[in-house]
Each structure stands twice: as C-alpha cells, then as structure tokens.
Image (cartoon, rainbow, N blue to C red):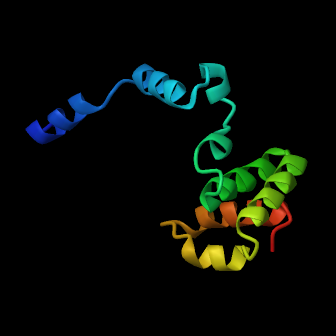
Amino acid sequence: MILTFLNLRYWLLIPDCETVKKTVCSYYGVNASELLKQRRGKFNEPRSVLNHVVLTAVLGPYGRKEDARSRAKELLKVQHDFSVQYFGKWLTYKNDADRDIILNGLRKAGLK
C-alpha cells in the first residue's frame, strides 16, 4: 500500500491504544479492568437506545440469555415502543445476513 502525504499525515495524528485507554479511564474515573467490563451504557449515554440494542443483541447468541433479557428490559425502559421490525428497517448493512444476526439476537432476548 502506498501512503500518500495526506494518509501519512492522518496516520500520525492517531493516538496509540494506550493513550486512548488512559484518556477514557481518566474521563470516566475508572481503572482499566472496569473499562473492559463493557459498562459503557452506564457511564456514557445511559439513555442511548443504540448502546442497549447492541448489548442486548450480542448477549443472547453467546449463551447469556438471562443477561440479554435483562438488557431488553432496560432497553424498553429507555424506549418503551421499541420494535425489532421498525429497527430492522432503519438498520442498514451491506450484507443482509449481518443485519439478521443483530435482529435475531434482539428476538432471542424476547423483543418483538
């Protein structure tokens, strides 16, 4: 891959992973192990529907169905009229199979 001047300049502006991690930990007042527990929905935008949707969708397929159901309840507290069908129309992926993974995860958590 040939790096153009602009690509190289952009690459040099990207901070390394450790710097990003330290900054995030400092901002939220947590240590690195707490950061890795995926508690973003509680620290950052607790009323953000998308945070709850992603966590709900990924927990079920990985065998954490009770956690997924719990997250689904939290999601419905944030947006009581949430529907998988409507969200599926809004969610766009290049490959429909990828979109279906998310939607099926939501359904497995008990959302309709």
In percent of the image, x 79 and y 53: which residue is there? 71
54 lies left or right of 12: right
Extreme-right residue of the structure: 66
Looking at the image, residue 69 sits to the left or right of residue 99; the answer is right
Q: Quadrant of the N terminus?
A: top left
- Above or below, 17 against 73 in this view is above
Q: Where residue 100 sits in the image (x, y, percent)?
A: 66, 67
Taking the image as shown, residue 30 lies to the left or right of residue 94, namely right
Q: Nearer the viewer, residue 42 or 6?
A: 42
Is residue 1 visible in the rendered image? The answer is no
Image quadrant assignment for residue 7: top left
Side of 15 relative to 54 (left or right): left
Towards the viewer: 21 or 98: 21
**Which quadrant, please, contains the C terminus?**
bottom right
Indicate the quadrant where residue 52 lies: bottom right
Q: Which residue occupies 45% across, 26% down?
A: 23
From this view, report whether residue 43 is shown above or below residue 95.
above
- Residue 42 visible to an observer of this rendering: yes
**Number of marks in the rendered image:** 0
**In the image, residue 32 above or below residue 38:** above
x and y, in percent, of residue 91 in the image: 56, 70
Q: Is residue 49 above or below residue 91?
A: above
Front in this rendered view, residue 2 or 104: 104
Q: Residue at x 85, y 53 (%)?
A: 70
Is 2 or 28 nearer to us in this picture?
28
Tell me where residue 28 appears, x and y as whole percent.
56, 31
